Image: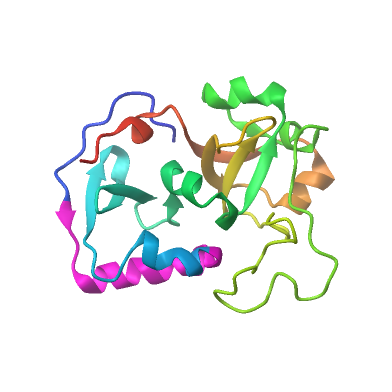
Amino acid sequence: MPFKKDLTASPKQKLKSSIQRSLRTSLLQTYPLLNPFIEEIMPKKSSLEQMKLPDRVSLYVCDGNPLFFQHDSDVLLPHLKLVHRFPQCFPTVRIDRGAIRFVLSGATLMAPGLTSAGGRLPEPDAREGRETLGEGAPNEGADGEGRWSRELEKGEPVVVMAEGKEEAAAVGVLVMGTREIKEKGKGPVMEDAHFLGDGLWRLNVD
């Protein structure tokens, strides 16, 4: 569901404390590596606001900083500004150079772009329990170099990096698990990716 045009958003609405707590809990459950930074991202005394966008999408903003967005009641997806601040905290895949222009132009992300020499998929750590160190553990799900170290399942959110680039290009939800991607090596792997150049990224939240 990439946004190809400038977006018209409703005025920001301050959320009740109970809703803020619920969203904070949901965010940490989905992205446990954010736990050490949650007070920096969403301080308890801060004001979390919601902006309603077209196509039943909600963008959540804290102290003027866009944090994450959500389609209906689907999984929370991080805004790319949050990803760029804490890139080590999100599960990632990497596309090869050849796939970059197609993905950024709105093409569906396909398996060959991830399984080629320039692509990268998570490689589970061979040490038992490495990715299950307990909720909120600083290195939960990460290997010694800070990379996601467990297989990702269908329906999980993921950040798309690009070969030769430092910053993330997109976020989205997998329609095929990473183990299946490696085994099949073909087919679409992500739908409804949200891209760096889309209207959501350009939206003024001040």
Question: How far across and how far down the image is residue 125, in percent?
Answer: 80, 63
Whole-percent x, y for residue 201 in the image:
37, 34
Q: Is residue 12 left or right of residue 88?
A: left
Q: Main secondary structure of the magenta part?
A: helix
- For residue 49, side relative to residue 163 (left or right): left
The residue depicted at 31 percent of the width and 72 percent of the height is: 21
Does 86 appear above or below 81? Answer: below
Q: Quadrant of residue 205?
A: top left
Nearer to us in this view, 62 or 116 = 62
The verdict on residue 9 being magenta is no
Residue at 76% in and 35% down: 186
Front residue of 74/201: it is: 201
Residue 135's spot in the image, x, y percent? 56, 77
Q: In the figure, residue 15 lies in which quadrant?
A: bottom left
Q: Residue at x 76, y 32 (%)?
A: 112
Residue 184 seen by the camera? yes
Give percent across and percent down for residue 180.
76, 50
Position above or below: 127 against 110: below
Looking at the image, residue 25 sits to the left or right of residue 43; the answer is right
- Name the residue rendered at 74%, 52% in the picture: 122
> Where are the magenta residues, as a range?
13-33
* Residue 155 seen in the figure: no
